[in-house]
Amino acid sequence: MDLNIDELKTGLASTLKDSLNADLPAIKEYGEKIIEEEKETLETLGQLLLSGQITADEMKSQLEDEKVTIENQVRAIQVMSTVALQNATNAVIKFLQDAVVKAVQAAI
Amino acid sequence: MRTNKLTLLLVFPLILSGCLQKWVADYNADVANEIVEAAKKVDAYYAELIEVRDSTATLSDQQVTSFTAKYKAIDNLLYGLYLKNQSRPLNDQSTAISKSILENLWRKYKGDLTTNKALLPVNRQRFTRNFEALLKSETVKEDQR
């Protein structure tokens, strides 16, 4: 049984890169959306406070709710990141599996 | 010797496939649909509430009764969604988000019948953002490879 280590290393790196490239853009895009929405919400709340339409206590309560919202959005990012890492790990395992099978087949 | 090699050929893939990692729950289309339904109901609740409170200074008893019934129905829906998420293995984050939407937002606002009118659109939008987080944490499970 013969495994070419250089080919294996190149293949592993390429597999890992392809898998992460498939999943990471969606995480980045959602992260940017979260930041943009947070900015807009804080601007709206700031305007409401400055114009006297809401009180300082109401602002404080709203900021607590924003904290809750950010926590939930970060949880969603955690799930997306976990799926991306799981996919990358499994892609590497499948690549190794294929490499071993090919090497064993060649040796038979 | 040939038998040993054939054994290797059969056993190696089995050993390696046993190494495949599973860190996140399977995608559940029913749960994804329920999230969308809950989000639509909350949004419709706020659309109606904003319209009614814009047109009247004080809600009538009949309007309060109507909104309270809708509030309770949505509360029930959100509680069911939380329980469904909680019952699934490898689903801690989705469970936490659905619990947070129910307890930290929906039950905190209590239907927003007496909340400052100026804050209703903000609260409505906040629910949209939280439901989007919950939906994303579900639909991304479909991308598992």
Image (tube, coloured by chain):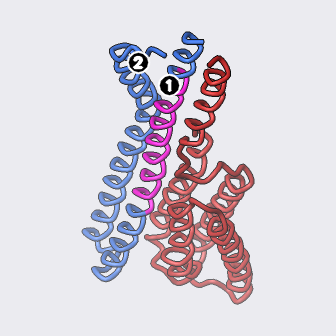
Chain colours: A blue, B red
- The residue beneath circle 2 is A11
Q: Going 57% across and 21% down the picture, which residue do you hit?
A: A101
User: Which of A96/B53 is in front?
Assistant: A96
What chain does badge 2 belong to?
A
Quadrant for residue A62, please give it.
Answer: bottom left
Seen in the picture, residue A77 relative to B91 is either above or below; the reply is above
- Judge the density around disc 2: few (<14), some (14-19), many (≥20) Cα neighbours within 10 Å: some
In the drawing, does residue B42 fall left or right of residue A8?
right
- Which amino acid, by three-letter code, is at mark 1? Phe
Quarter-wise, where is residue B94 in the image? bottom right
Q: Earlier in the sequence, mark 2 or mark 1?
A: 2
Residue A88 in the image, given as x and y percentages of width and height:
45, 35
Residue hosting label 1: A95
**Magenta includes B79?**
no
- The magenta segment is A72-98
Q: Secondary structure at mark 2?
A: helix
**Dot 1: element:** helix
State which quarter of the image contains the N terminus of chain B. Answer: top right
Give the Cα distance between marks 2 and 1: 8 Å
Q: Which mark is residue B78?
A: none
